[in-house]
Image (spheres, grey):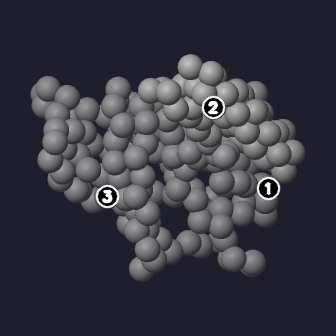
């Protein structure tokens, strides 16, 4: 029994030390965002880092990385004078289902990136422009529309707009898309819809 308590205390101390060390390397990092659990299970102590990404900005309206971004309302389209500040071509995808969805995308002929997006989360597809350029390669996007045990990949066109940064809250409303259940499919199939 004392062995279990010793392991649990060691895990807590190690977890706190790692979190504190990592928090010092991140600007505005929140230790509570990084350490998810410290627990004893079957006599073995476990701790795991929930994320090595600072999600504190998601709650305060600041910077919110794609992987932890909860849905926030889109910003109005930037004024014409703001074109010089636009550094990215972006679109934002919102998961409006109550389950995680799978999609994959790539820029031009680059490598496919596979994403599993949680319910009520959003994802920014952004291409950082090269110096003096305001264009991006083609965005190829596929969604696994089958919410059963199978998979069925369908291609969608995702239009992008120029933005001053790479987060969904900076993407104009015209470049926001929703993943929703397809009507009359008993929530077994999903599709991408452009936001109104």
Q: Is residue 133 above or below residue 175?
A: below
The residues bearing labels 3 and 2 have C-alpha atoms spaced at a distance of 46 Å
**Which residue is rendered at x = 34% and y = 42% of the image?**
101
25 with respect to 142 (left or right): right
Which one is nearer the viewer's eye here, 21 or 102?
Answer: 21
Q: Position of residue 177 (x, y in %)?
A: 43, 43
Residue at image coords 55%, 50%: 124
Marks 3/1: CA–CA distance: 34 Å
Residue 11 image position (x, y, % from top left): 66, 34
Callout in the foreground (3, 2): 2
Q: Which residue is mark 3?
A: 142
Query: Do we see residue 176 in this rendering?
Result: no
> Can you say which quadrant of the picture contains the N terminus?
top right
Between circles 3 and 1, the one closer to the viewer is 3
Q: Which residue is mark 2?
A: 7
Furthest residue in direction top, as rendered: 1
- Is residue 9 shown above or below 169? above
Say if residue 121 shows up in the picture. yes
């Amino acid at each position: 029994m004392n062995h279990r308590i010793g392991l649990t205390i060691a895990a807590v101390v190690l977890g706190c030390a790692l979190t504190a060390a990592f928090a010092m390397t991140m600007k505005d990092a929140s230790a509570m965002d990084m350490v998810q659990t410290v627990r004893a299970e079957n006599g073995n102590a476990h701790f795991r880092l929930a994320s090595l990404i600072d999600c504190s900005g998601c709650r305060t309206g600041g910077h919110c990385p794609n992987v932890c971004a909860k849905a926030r309302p889109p910003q109005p389209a930037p004024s014409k004078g703001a074109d010089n500040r636009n550094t990215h071509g972006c679109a934002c995808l919102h998961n409006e289902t109550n389950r995680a969805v799978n999609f994959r995308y790539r820029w031009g002929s680059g490598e496919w990136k596979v994403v599993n997006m949680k319910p009520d989360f959003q994802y920014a597809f952004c291409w950082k422009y090269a110096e003096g350029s305001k264009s991006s390669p083609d965005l190829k996007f596929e969604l696994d529309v089958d919410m059963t045990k199978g998979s069925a990949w369908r291609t969608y066109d995702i239009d992008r707009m120029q933005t001053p940064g790479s987060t969904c809250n900076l993407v104009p409303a015209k470049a926001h898309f929703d993943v929703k259940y397809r009507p009359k499919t008993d929530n077994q199939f999903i599709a991408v819809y452009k936001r109104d």
